[in-house]
Amino acid sequence: MSTAVQRSEPATTVPPHADIVVIGAGFGGIYAHHRFRKLGMSVFGFEQGTDVGGTWYWNRYPGARCDVESVDYCYSFSDDLLDEWQWSERFSTQPEILEYATYVADKFDLRRDIKFETKVVSCRYDEAANLWTVTTDKGDSITCHYLVTTVGCLSVPKDPEFEGLENFKGQWVQTGAWPKEGVDWAGKNVLVIGTGSSAIQTIPEVAKTAGHLTVFQRTANYSVPAYNGPLPEHRREEVFADYPAYLDMLKHTRGGQTFELGTDLRAADFSPEEQRDRLEKAWRYGRWNLQSCFRDITINEDTNQMVREFFAEKLRGIVKDPATAEKLNPKGYPFGTKRLCLDSDYFETFNRPNVDLVDINEEPIVRITESGLQTSEKEYPADLIIFAIGFDAMTGPLVNLGIEGRGGASLTEAWQDGPECYLGIAAPGFPNLFMVNGPSSVSVLSNMILTLEHHVDWVADCIEYMRGNGFDRLEARKDATHEWAAHTEMVANRTLFPKANSWYMGANVEGKPRMFLAYIGGFDNYVARFNEVAAKGFEGFDLNRSKVEQTA
């Protein structure tokens, strides 16, 4: 925690024009305001929530924590901020992370140019004027030269489309849009639908005081112990010997973080005894060490199978009922090819007498009733239903903005066969539009705050380059975009990731094109590619002086 600073007041009116409009006020959005102001340009922004925080504003569900160590999951741009803020836990809770976002907004006076409780409904590009017009649900309209989206990768929760939900007499909520006023489940019959990351964090907390909890699982997930608590001493020494240098070092790693057992060696480079020892150590260290203890876990079937068997052994040692343990053991996809979850007593929760597990592959959900949920076998009474069914990841937040580029072509139409986004930041036909952590970026496969900082810094450098060289319009070239899409697909296909029906592949949303939505080549390689593009005069982009500029 840190001492309080003066709270900055948000914008109340929308100006007719700004040089840059930023959509979203999560960690990417508020940093964008800070960074773009340094360009000496006018900046204005919009945010649907009542305050800053993004993901950590909306995801208030019980047990919500970051799955990256807090000392890594933080801004690196300010040494003063690093000195002032101290995290209380190894993996901080949602309230503390939201408090951090609030502190940053206060310290750097970042609210004054943001209109909160406002949804952007359309963004239209006028080629003749070389301007974007952004319109909101409040009837506001603003033009800008540069449009920057910082809307997050996991910010559009999937709607619970269950027959009969409208007739349910109890309360129902979504983990990804948790009520700000909170939810009371003490002593009640609670149903949780879903066993992804948010459910894995929610379930142990709800089980502690619920009268009875029934969990409905479609796909079992791999989850490993977080071992939350104070930062271990060996990590404290590593981080705080020189904190700024440590964070700079993270920018040169594959995932924007380091692991005790991270290695460039394959499983075959170790003896069977050494392999077992590394697996046991990885389990004891927690975090994502189990996914990092051999370099080839997500590319070699045999190595992956060894880890799967080790995981199953650990699971059977935790869950007392063999039938329940078997249901909870993931099947049908390789270890680590869905986002590996970190938990606090998730599997142990199924040993509680007030918790049951239903596999909906064996016992499908038929409908929601007035008093609960009907499966093919029986009706489960409920006072509260918690939907933890995931998000329309990566593309959903962007296509919901009503973006129309040159000639009125919509982003939705441009991506109907799957998104092609050059470097994960720009698309052909949409000049001066920068999509921070867009599809085909490293984003969700890395430490998100570092990737957000990188993208925003690169956009700022790009705009500065354009202004310094007399350009006022930038657009991704089709050939470069196709090449990046092909490269992204090639890198993904070298791994086992496409074997899983995950949200990485868009497989959790009906009708969504099936393709790997992120760049899996590593944050270090990704940054190197960006640096190379910039060094070559922003290779892969067309930079022009617009007709407006030429005739002025």
Image: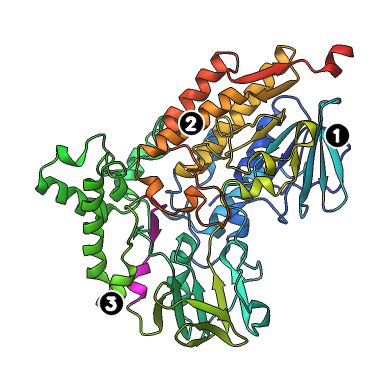
Looking at marks 3 and 2 on the same chain, the residue that comes earlier in the sequence is marked by 3
Quadrant position of residue 296: top left
Q: Which quadrant of the figure has residue 148?
A: top right
Mark 3 vs mark 2: in front: 2
Q: Please state the horizontal and vertical placement of residue 313, each as a whole percent of the image.
A: 21, 63
N-terminal of the pair, mark 2 or mark 1, is: 1
Nearer the camera: disc 3 or disc 1: 3
Residue 463 occupies quadrant? top right
Instruction: Give above or below for 257 relative to 174.
Output: above
Residues under labels 3 and 1: Cα distance? 62 Å
Cβ–Cβ below 8 Å for labels 3 and 1? no
CA neighbours of label 2 inside 10 A, class few (<14), some (14 to 19), many (20+): few
Residue carrying label 1 = 17
Q: Which residue is mark 2?
A: 486
Name which residue lies at 68% across and 24% down.
475
User: The magenta stretch spans which residues?
Assistant: 337-350
Name which residue type carries label 1. His
Please give the name of the residue rendered at 28% of the width and 71% of the height, measured from the top-left corner. 326
Is 437 on the left-hand or right-hand side of 470? left
* Residue 201 visible in image: yes
